[in-house]
Image (spheres, grey):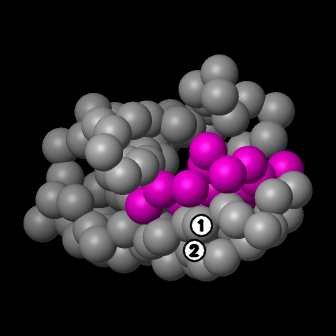
């Protein structure tokens, strides 16, 4: 059973940056396509970025050019670098496989506000 632990969220002003981390247990991590998802209050959870086991990436239009997903298979960790943050990026951010077949972690809160 792969467990996911997200960290790195916080309160940031518009235009600021944050780097999220997701540590995964289990030996199958390197074989999984992984994604960062987010859920804003009153909205459905959405996929914002994904990365295949080989490193190919894809982004939602709303974050393209501002967010960068990466992974370190040796550390069983996936990252999300978020730049030029906007108030509409405020949400709880989660990582999971693509599709989300793993048990969800607790997520990490990102709040963008002045």
Q: Residue at x 52, y 37 (%)?
A: 48
Counting from the top left corner in percent of width and height, residue 78 is at 54, 60
Residue 84 lies within the magenta run: yes
From the viewer's perspective, is 102 left or right of 77?
left
Q: Is residue 35 above or below residue 52?
A: below
**Which residue corresponds to the image point at 79% horizontal and 41% vertical from the top-left?**
66
Task: Kindly check if marks 2 and 1 are in contact, taking CB atoms under 8 A apart as contact.
Answer: yes
Left or right side of 83 for 22: left
The residue labelled by disc 1 is: 111
Residue drawn at 39 percent across, 35 percent down: 46
Does label 2 or label 1 sit earlier along the sequence? 2
**Residue 114: image x %, image y %?**
78, 68
Within the image, what quadrant is residue 3 found in? bottom left
| Depth check, front residue: 98 or 13 | 13
Q: Quadrant of residue 95?
A: bottom left
Instruction: Tell me the residue that label 2 is attached to.
Output: 9
Residue 47 vertical position relative to residue 102 in the rendered view, above or below:
above
| Span shown in magenta | 75-92
Task: Determine the residue positioned at 48% across, 56% down.
Answer: 91
Assess disc 1: are there few (<14), some (14-19) or many (≥20) residues with their C-alpha within 10 Å of its C-alpha: many
What secondary structure is found at the residue carrying circle 1?
Answer: strand
Residue 64 seen by the camera: yes
Residue 77 appears in the figure: no
């Amino acid at each position: 059973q792969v467990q996911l632990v997200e960290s790195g969220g916080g309160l940031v002003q518009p235009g600021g940056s944050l780097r999220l981390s997701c540590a995964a247990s289990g030996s199958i991590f390197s074989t999984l396509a992984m994604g960062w998802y987010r859920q804003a209050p009153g909205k459905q959870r959405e996929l914002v970025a994904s990365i295949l086991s080989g490193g190919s990436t894809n982004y939602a239009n709303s974050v393209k050019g501002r967010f960068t997903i990466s992974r370190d298979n040796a550390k069983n960790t996936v990252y999300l670098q978020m730049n030029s943050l906007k108030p509409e990026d405020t949400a709880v951010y989660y990582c999971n496989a693509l599709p989300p077949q793993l048990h969800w972690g607790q997520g990490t809160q990102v709040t963008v506000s002045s």
